[in-house]
Amino acid sequence: MLVNLIREGLGQIIAAISVLTQGKPIARSQEQQAQVTAACKNLSLYQFYACPFCIKVRRKMHQLNLPIEFRDIKKNPELRSELEDNGGRVKVPCLRIEENGDVQWMYESNDIIAYLQQRFG
């Protein structure tokens, strides 16, 4: 119990520092940003707010100016079940990618960042 409180407290501090130091996102033309926004409608990030690996992914998303939906599985048990049932395990961060009717679940933060950078960077 005490360990969880300490972990959550430190996570909140790290998240706050991250928000304060994240800088400005890349600038795109309105047309380019509209295309990125449309592409991001098929993406969602399953995450915990205070998870350091999730923070790392969110920072890259901010840097790339990606409006991807956040799904906090700690706050919503239905999303947790959805991640476990469809993705195969309860682990965050996890990027849900839907393309042409196919769904892929990407789990590792470095893999997620590489995918986002390659696709939108």
Image (spheres, rainbow, N blue to C red):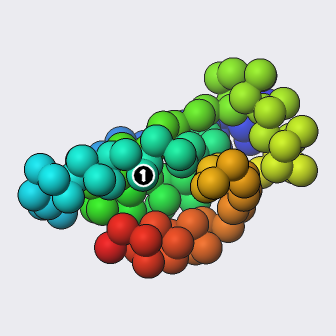
81 with respect to 28 (left or right): right
Vertical side of 50 occupied by 32: above or below? below
87 with respect to 26 (left or right): right
- For the N terminus, give its image quadrant: top right
Vertical side of 72 occupied by 41: above or below? below
Residue 8 or residue 26, whichever sits in front: 26
- For the C terminus, give its image quadrant: bottom left
Vertical side of 9 occupied by 77: above or below? above
Q: Position of residue 68 (x, y in %)?
A: 44, 44
Q: Position of residue 35 (x, y in %)?
A: 29, 53
Residue 116 or residue 60, whichever sits in front: 116
The image quadrant of residue 90 is top right
Mark 1 neighbour class, 10 Å CA radius: few under 14, some 14 to 19, many 20 or more: some
Q: Is residue 51 visible?
A: no
Residue denoted by label 1: 39
How many badges with numbers are in the image? 1
Residue positioned 38% across, 56% down in the render? 61
- Amino acid type, label 1: Ala
Q: Position of residue 59 (x, y in %)?
A: 38, 57
The image quadrant of residue 73 is top right
Q: Position of residue 78 (x, y in %)?
A: 77, 22
**In the displayed image of the protein, which residue is found farthest to the front?**
100
Residue positioned 14% across, 60% down in the render? 28
Q: Is residue 77 visible?
A: yes
* Helix, strand or loop status at disc 1: helix
Residue positioned 10% across, 58% down in the render? 29
Residue 95 or residue 108, whichever sits in front: 95
Residue positioned 84% across, 43% down in the render? 86
The image quadrant of residue 99 is bottom right
